[in-house]
Amino acid sequence: MATELSTKFLTIADWAKRVA
């Protein structure tokens, strides 16, 4: 579960970078 959460966080961070 921790790995899935980390992956989600990284995905959100990458998305935020593109949007920013």
Image: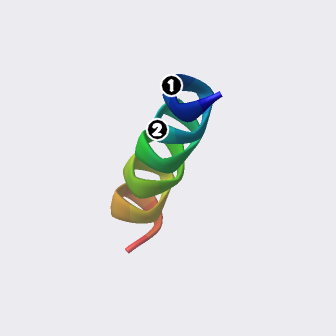
Q: Residues within 10 Å of mark 2 (few under 14, many from 20)?
A: few
| Residue 15 x, y percent position in the rendering | 49, 52
Question: Which residue type does callout 2 highlight?
Answer: Ser
The residue shown at (40%, 55%) is 13
Q: Residue furthest front?
A: 1
Which element carries disc 2, helix, strand or loop? helix
Above or below: residue 16 compared with residue 13:
below
Q: Is residue 8 left or right of residue 16?
A: right
Residue contact between numbered discs 1 and 2, judged by CB atoms under 8 Å: yes
Which element carries disc 1, helix, strand or loop? helix
Question: Which residue type does callout 1 highlight?
Answer: Thr
| Residue 6 x, y percent position in the rendering | 46, 38
Residue at the spot of label 2 = 6
Q: Is residue 4 left or right of residue 15?
A: right
Q: Residue furthest bottom?
A: 20
The residue shown at (47%, 66%) is 19
Residue 17: image quadrant is bottom left
Q: Specify the label residue 3 is tagged with.
A: 1
